[in-house]
Image (cartoon, helix red, strand yellow):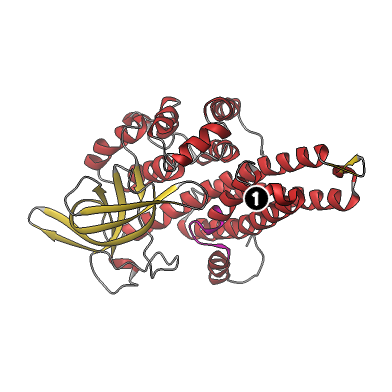
Amino acid sequence: MDFNFSDDQEMLRDSVRKWVDKGYDFEKRRGVVKAGGFSRDAWGELAGLGLTGLYVPEEHGGMGFGPVDAMVVMEELGRGLVLEPFAQGALIAGGVIAGYAPEAVKAQWLPKIASGDALVVLAQQERAARYKLHHVTTSARQDGKGWTITGDKSIVPAGDKADAFIVPARVSGAADDAKGIALFIVERSATGVSTKGYPTVDGARAAEVKFSNAGATLLAAAGTGFAALEHAIDIGIAASCAEAVGVMDKLLAATVEYLNTRKQFGVPIASFQALRHRTADVKMQLELARSMSYYASLKLNDSPEARRRALAQAKVQLGNSMRFVGQQCIQMHGGIGVTDEYIAGHYFKRLTALEMSYGDTMHQLGEVSARMQDTAGVFA
């Protein structure tokens, strides 16, 4: 299999890296954190690069690119610790609406997503769900005027800044019945929608969102709604895997630079054999993570069963790698590694948040176990 990137993908990587280096440096990021963890100006700059239309088909004003292109972009955004919810607002929203919505909904939302005029994020997490996608208590009711939604969603990325939400809601069945779940689009400005925003541990922003008979547009009906939700989560997992590779790559580089600069007994501590061995272990975990990130992106357009198993496997490896790389690099830095003025601690916080996103390592290990059939092989 050819793992080389095309010339277009390398150009895409280069353009995103240049923007991160020049337009989203550490000081710019600190300013975004102080302002609340989200910058509409930065989102507009991403749109200016055409990135918000990455998953939007060309007929709706987008670029019509695929999972590998998204992986390239997410790695570079990870290197820059970009706070804006690109995976949510561009990849998940663009991919799910383009893949499952009726034509009228596509025409209404996809051009605005591609241009960056609308930030649409997935609001699926409920307090009692514990990462279980089929546990949905938010309800949807249809009347003569359309649909209304009632319920609460938690940890919605940039929820108090978004323009609209993709919301799983129950139209029939008990709380854990996957067949009764449909997907809806709800505008934040709709009557009955309230948000409470707060900063997250990594400096980004999230919100609790309440819906009280809020008007909604049907995106995917019950029957296809849960399949669309699973696909949305898998897009998010693949994106978080790629972002984590970028974060770990940059954190390792910062650690190596520190080891070559910090001196003890008159020599750089990079010359100490114990630290050299530890750095080699970190590099090995990074490369394991990179290979599984590639695997996740390449499997993203597979059949639902194969895709779900592959993405769970990838998230398990990435979770283990993120924890190991983050902890080891902070240990090699010592106390300076957790100071707010130094970037290493911010990379560690981002890895912690990514490990918890879309199902933590223990949850994904359970998903892998549930999908094993005749063999315990990771790539079965």
Residue plotted at (62% across, 44% down): 247
Q: Does the magenta stretch include residue 355?
A: yes
Dot 1 alpha-carbon crowd within 10 angstroms: few under 14, some 14 to 19, many 20 or more: some
Total count of labels: 1
Boundaries of the magenta span: 354-361
Residue 71 seen by the camera? yes
Observer-nearest of 24 and 375: 24
Tell me the residue at 38%/70% (across/down). Answer: 128
Q: Nearer the viewer, residue 12 or 343?
A: 343
Name the residue nearer the viewer: 226 or 206: 206
Is residue 80 found inside the magenta-colored segment of the image?
A: no
- Which residue is farthest left? 144
- Residue occupying the point 65% across, 59% down: 320
List the residue tagged with mark 1.
338
Q: Position of residue 311 (x, y in %)?
A: 54, 56
Q: Which amino acid does label 1 sit on?
A: Val
Looking at the picture, tell me which residue is in the foreground, 45 or 27.
27
Residue at point 29% right, 62% down? 152
Farthest residue in the bottom direction? 174
Residue 261 relative to residue 361: left or right: right
Place of residue 85 in the rendered image (x, y in percent of width and height, measured from the top left) = 44, 43
The C terminus sits in image quarter? bottom right
Quick check: can you spot residue 294?
no
Secondary structure type for disc 1: helix
